[in-house]
Image (cartoon, rainbow, N blue to C red):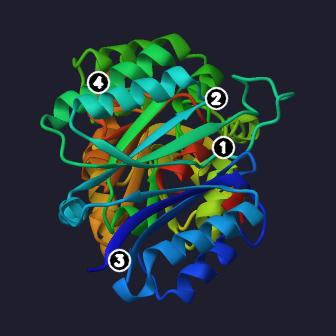
Amino acid sequence: MNEIILMTLSGKDRPGVTAGITGILANFNVNILDIGQAVIHNTLSLGILIQVPTEAGASNLLRDLLFRAHELDMHVRFEPVDPRDYEQWVSGQGKSRHIITLLGRRISALHIARVAEIAASHGLNIDNINRLSGRVSLETPSNTEKTKACVEFSVRGIPADASALRQAFLQAASDYEVDIAFQHDDIFRRNRRLVVFDMDSTLIEAEVIDELAKEAGVGDQVAEITEAAMRGELDFNESFRKRVALLKGLDVSALDKIAARLKLTEGAETLVSQLKALGFKTAILSGGFNYFAKGLQQRLGFDYVYANELDIIDGKVTGEVTGEIVNGERKAQLLREIAEREGLRLEQTIAVGDGANDLPMLSIAGLGIAFRAKPLVRESAKQAISTLGLDGILYLIGFRDRDGI
């Protein structure tokens, strides 16, 4: 009867270790049932689950492996595996899998422990842990914009209460000032092709209508209307028209002045350039204004832009907008239309925004991300990023720092 043996090898990493060990296995016609290898700080850990044919002679194989491991200055350990245990392990391969992504300026043992504790308490078993962020020098200050840390957990199982699990991760993220994403690991996660963005306070660090109001000398009045809308006293369209009406008479030169001082959000340029290099389609779906969104399109190369059109006559803002207002429902509709145009399913899309009017598109996208959003939006969206810049989104699609193009 064939024997099943789990072999684990550890020691200093160097070229030729895996080749030397598997070469001996090949000489004995061994069947590889499972294999995994990791290197942490130049230390190799290699595990191989093997099936040894009866005629090969397990004792001779183990003897040769011990000699080879000694020559390589490696530690080796053998453990027999009961065939019934093996079959039980095989039967679990079809279980649902998820990806937990832990992001922050730095990651400590406390963060890892909390994520692992929450996963275990909800019946999830960790299969793999990988670092997606680059190596950090000890001389680099922590908790600065120069630092990024990300660890990805592959977990197996179905949580008994998905809502409770999500709340636990949200609470842990808030307690420890990190971000924790939980995604189903399926073919769509690995095949996203379209990313759509809100503009104000997402791609840029400003609300353009507030900047316009300051230039027009009506900043306080616009702020009052915004507050009324947030209290639910006005819907988006009504509040938007009231705010735009206050801009009547503003000289068009003010738009150029504002555009010149707008600051891109941390990571925006990196994210968009990497997405384009990877073949993603990108779009701006904004409740702001086309004048500024088109400028971002020219600067960063977005494929689509939809925003509101300020009416301008004789070099002056009339206080009105032309065409259909881009509100929350319109953003969701545009996401559907662009996806259909590109021949994509909604599961292949990503939507990013910070405001309540972004929730409709965040809810229908395959991956909806609340970026540096208010608590209500953060709790309502599927995922949230608050600690890193926009380029942290790359980690959620499995991108590693070393994959930079």
Quarter of the image where the N terminus is located: bottom left
Query: Which residue is identified by label 4?
Result: 168
Q: CA–CA distance between discs 4 and 3?
A: 38 Å
Q: Amino acid at mark 4?
A: Ala
Q: Residue at x 35, y 77 (%)?
A: 341
Local crowd size for mark 2, using a 10 Å CA cut-off: few (<14), some (14–19), many (≥20): some
User: Residue 181: x, y in percent?
Assistant: 40, 40
Q: Disc 2 marks which amino acid?
A: Arg
- Residue plotted at (35% across, 84% down): 54
Q: Residue at x 73, y 25 (%)?
A: 144
Identify which residue, 34 or 230, lies in the foreground: 34
| Mark whose residue sits in front, 1 or 4 | 4
Circle on res. 105: 2
Which amino acid type is shown beneath numbered disc 3? Arg
**Badge 3, how many Cα within 10 Å: few under 14, some, many 20+?**
few
Rendered residue at 59%/30% (across/down) = 206
Q: Which residue is mark 1?
A: 267
- Kindly indicate whether the residue at mark 4 contacts the one at mark 2 (C-beta within 8 angstroms): no
Question: Quick one: 222 or 276, which is closer to the camera?
Answer: 276
Q: Earlier in the sequence, mark 3 or mark 1?
A: 1
Which numbered mark, 2 or 3, is in the foreground of this view? 2
C-alpha gap between disc 3 and disc 1:
28 Å
Q: Secondary structure at mark 4?
A: helix
For mark 3, what is the residue?
Answer: 341
Secondary element type, mark 2: loop
* Residue 86 percent coordinates (x, y): 25, 64
